[in-house]
Image (cartoon, rainbow, N blue to C red):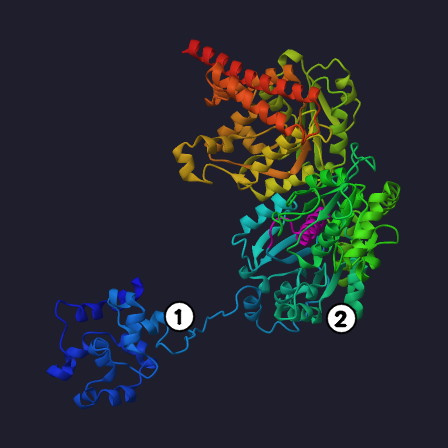
Amino acid sequence: MKTIRKRLGHFVKAVFSDQAAPSPVEKGANQQRTASTFSQADVESVRPFFDVDFYCSQNPDVAKSGHDPIEHYLMWGWQERRDPSRDFSTHYYLEAYPDILQNRLNPLVHYAIAGRKEGRRAKPDGPLAVAYSQDAKPVQGYLSAIASLKEYKGKPAVHGKPEAGRLDIHWVIPDFSRGGGGHMTIFRMVHLLETLGHKCTIWVFIGDLHKQPSDAYDDIVKYFQCVGAEIKITDDGVIDAAGDALIATSWNTVYPVAAAEKFRQKFYFVQDHEPEFYPTGSDSLLARESYSFDLACICAGDWLKGLMSKRYGRWARSFDLAYDHEVYKIKASKRFGDRKRTKIAVYAREATSRRCVNLALVALDMLGRERDDFEVHFYGQERLPFNEVNYPAWNHGVLDSAALADLYNVCDIGICFSATNYSLVPQEMMACGLPLIELDGESTRAVFPEGIVSLAGPQPESIKNKINELIASPEERQRQAAKAFEWVGALTWEKSARAVEAAILERLDLAKAPNVVRSAEKLLDVVIPTYNGIGEIEKVVEALRSQSLYPQMAIYCVDSSSRDGTAEWLAAQKDIKTTTIPQREFQHGRTRNFGASLGNSPYIAFLTQDAIPATSYWASDICQMMDHFPSSAGLFGRHLPYPEHPRHIRDEINKHFDEMLRFPLLLSKDTDPAKWASGDIGWRQVLHYYSDNNSCMRRTVWQEMPYPEVDFGEDQIWAKAIIEAGYSKIYAPTATVYHSHDFGPKDTYERSATESRFFYQFFGYELAPSSEIELSKIVENEQLAFRKAAALYNLDKEETNLRNAIIAEKYRGWFDGMSAAKRLMGKNH
């Protein structure tokens, strides 16, 4: 409205002065005076909507006067409620839209410039005008983007062999959100192909959720995989990009891939038969049409491979959908068939229709009328479209991989349906010892050997009967689970990545991958202080030796004169450089600085002797993230609780590190300058949190700013210093270690007192209340809450009492530690 008023400013002044000028028809005002009151732009804007013949026939006085009809209307006619054409009613427009008169706007000029675009009618019985624009996009999203691609049909790939060295592979992906299994497979392949030495680039097509590449990168690492790939948006030039391989990953990304011309080969990474995702219409037709392009298909499973080659005549190769062996496994706590109530895990992503969740719901409803000895654990969707069922049930929402493995290990039967191609879920369930019920169909029979899964449906009665059979026979459940566990154990993502690589190489007419020359120089020094670590350090070293980056790592242990044989064991390890120091010389900051000084790699990682790298990509993920964020001084990774520790301890640690995902992976005082300037305590705590149980420093920064030589909290003091100096820090959610403590009351008190003294002395934080009365109330409330939660954790009375004693000692330690720090600092002042 402001723009229109500015456009009509001269007009408003003339018409809405204290006394409006008289009509020239009545007073004979000269033409020069009339023309000077508005611009030619106003005349041109209304000309398409003005009928001169109509205006003159309806207004003979204007025709006789010799004045220009449009100019007459603009200056006086609209005030006299004269109509400029049969299709526009001045009276109606002013009455229907009082804001026009209130803002002193000419109705026809407003309609021409803005009204028709806003959906305003020109007369009471008239149609709504559709605005014209050469840049109009009547359909948004994928279809609009596809329409903008010129001559996308039939663009040939540039054939020929790549230059010596790694392959340059580009992936075009649809935008994504947390929990997408298809995207997890894509990002996992990117990660593994990078591990094999190839260079990858990821293009996000139609970034509705991710407008900036940095946001997309953060979410890929937070919720999927750590990748070194550069992230781009397709608007930034995928059509003009060049490389060895360009890979479409969904039907809508086929179109920009087909339009690109500067790649040696182009591929279609097919994970499902996408026309079946939609009702018959635009999307289903274009999805089916995507298979008509001459792209080489790399398919998830043999069913899709057969479909692409036989039905669509495409060149096709396949790979297996596997699972993460380090996450999905049978745990020591797994129980087979000795429960009074059978627990059923149901993948309930109801929003995805091909998951056929409603078939499972009807079958379970029928089962609930017949028996009451089962319970259901839904997951895969935060909110379900129902609130009540006739059997005990819980909805776990969207879970990360560790939580999924926990759920599968406490359940007895798994249900996961797919009406099209199979997904990742069945393999993950099988790896955790869960017998699976799948939908009987062409795709499942093509993928799963006989006896690996129980096939049922699509009739709900058939599904109900199959669940009944497995509930009734724990022996059959265990037999099927054992057979499936053996079958799935042969599947690995590394094999699948090799299959994808082989397909790309075959299409590029290469017998083998280009020679990827890895540097012989060390990239990462790993420093571990040790003391009486036998029983712990061996597991850490074993995990380090399994690292994909192991040839480029150096391990340095600084032992504080252990008395249990730790130093001797370390000295016998040829790949570990061990230095022994007197125990009295150990100090958290100084000892770590000494360990860092022993090497010369560009990155220095720190572990404690009880922090075990959880995956074989711990080291490579650290280096990839340090490379990706060159402004960073250091990095800390996620801690995973030991699986054998009590659930409430596991929940506490997982909750702590889940909180980190609320923030960008890279943080500095420039992330939120206003918060930094305000001195916001909560924000300062986020910025200086750091844990060198699992961390890495850039050597050039360490040389400038080594750890402070303090007895405790060197990591957080260092993080505070580098943030204040203008550096940034990284949180690496995929560089995980197993590290947690199940302290008893005494150890809890000592640890809490030390923490409280430290935080008050160096940061001024008060971890405990200032009075005994407040302390008692807080302890009482937390103990009460824990007693209520004890049933969820299946804790008996003895264990509950122990945990409540630990709660009391935690707060007592905080209180005493803070009090001691206050007394000490009071004396010093």
In this orientation, which residue lies closer to the viewer: 624 or 732? Answer: 732
* Callout 1 amino acid: Lys
Q: Is residue 660 visible?
A: yes
Quadrant (top left/top right/bottom left/bottom right) for the C terminus:
top left
Which secondary structure lies at badge 1? loop
Outermost left residue: 27
Quickly name the residue at label 1: 117
Quickly name the residue at label 2: 312
Q: Main secondary structure of the magenta part?
A: helix
Quadrant (top left/top right/bottom left/bottom right) for the N terminus:
bottom left
Instruction: Tell me the quarter of the picture where residue 372 sits.
Output: top right
In this orientation, which residue lies closer to the viewer: 771 or 21? Answer: 771
Outermost front residue: 369
Outermost top residue: 827
Q: Is residue 445 magenta?
A: no
* Callout 2 amino acid: Tyr
Highlighted magenta segment, given as a residue range: 176-199
Q: Is residue 103 visible?
A: no
Image x and y of residue 560, in percent: 68, 16
Q: Is residue 192 magenta?
A: yes
Q: First in sequence, mark 2 or 1: give its number.
A: 1
